[in-house]
Amino acid sequence: NIYKNLRSCGKRQHASSITRTTGTQPAPTTIITNSENDTYLKIRNEARTAIQDEPLITPLLQSTILSSSAHNFATLIAKIVSSRLFLHSSTASPFTLNTVTKIIKDAMESDELEYGYSMAEATRLDLLACKRRDPACLTLLEAVCFYKGFAALVCHRAARRAWGKKVTASNDAMTKGKNTRLVSLWLQSQSSAAFGVDIHPCAEIGVGVFFDHGTGVVIGETAKVGHNCTILHDVTLGGTGKEIGDRHPKVGNNAMIGAGTKILGNLTIGHRSKIGAGSLVLISVPNGATAVGVPAKIIGYAQEKRPGSIVDGSLTQVSLHKRNESNASMQRNISELSFPTMLHDVTLGG
């Protein structure tokens, strides 16, 4: 099954990339990639410009983006997202702001891979996707500070990396040897309350993913989302309510899922597929297909190569003909396919 092997993929990194391992042990040293550093510097420069233009925003930016402790991309993201999360936490929260920041920072600096990417690199590509796909987003700073979907995805990636670690420090013989889960569930719960996005820590999500608006997105425990997808608000990747085990949808690369869509059950949404707004999807959708309706039916095939990047919400780029693929290829289950180990080139601010 390709999903079980994805963590060993993506080893072809550019020469300046961080030295990574496929396990959970950190590397001896952490080297910031040129791309991460460029993104970090760009966000800081945008923050300085914002203070000049709008002095009222100064307290927020000086305490997070321009803080002396935000000395690289990982710490910058940890500072701003934890600040946003903590503002919505209960006054009886068991964690201090510094503790929440450390949880996210440790995950950002971890070498643990998901689909072949570290959290820092995945987060950078998620951030660029926000800027690239939303015409209302003029700067990376806006996405970092104000986009609920981006912040929720950061919290999810941190929760996923805190999940399932062996408990070794406990003096309780009954506890020692168990796997961690409560911190991850707290992050999920707080992220859901703060940002309106509910993602189980075990869900697997690729890079360059954009939750447009984000509000109302629900992604279940065994769901999987490929690279470069766009998911609009009020989308559910859920179970049928009757099954246990592997029971949630699997979404391929470069897919676009319209607002209000409900996809239920252990079915597959193929690479480059599009789902129209308000659809109820109860069947698998083949590669490149466009489905819409209640229940959803296939009405054609995507004309564009990367629907997840184009975000054709009105479904104007739909053809009645398949895009140079054999019928056998179109009907293959997504579990027989391989996610590409690298995304197409994404330039800073592009």
Image (spheres, rainbow, N blue to C red):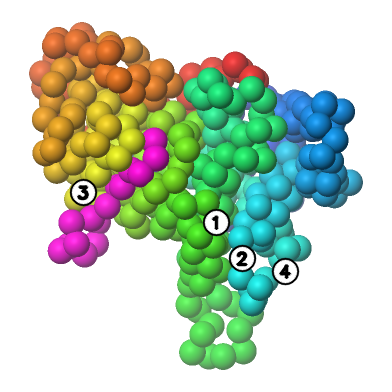
Q: Amino acid at mark 3?
A: Leu
Q: Nearer the viewer, residue 206 or 76?
A: 76
- Which mark is on residue 96? 4
Query: Sequence-wise, which precedes: disc 4 or disc 1?
Result: 4
Badge 4 marks a residue whose secondary structure is loop
Q: Amino acid at mark 4?
A: Thr
Q: Distance from label 2 to label 1 (Cα)?
A: 8 Å
Residue 196 in sight:
yes
Residues at discs 3 and 2 in contact (Cβ within 8 Å): no
| Span highlighted in magenta in the image | 232-247
Disc 1: which residue? 194
Q: Amino acid at mark 2?
A: Ser
Quadrant occupied by the N terminus: top left
Residue 157 in sight:
no
Q: Position of residue 68 (x, y in %)?
A: 89, 46
- Name the dominant secondary structure of the magenta segment: loop
**Tag nearer the camera, 3 or 2:** 2
User: Taking 337 as reference, is 332 left or right?
Assistant: left
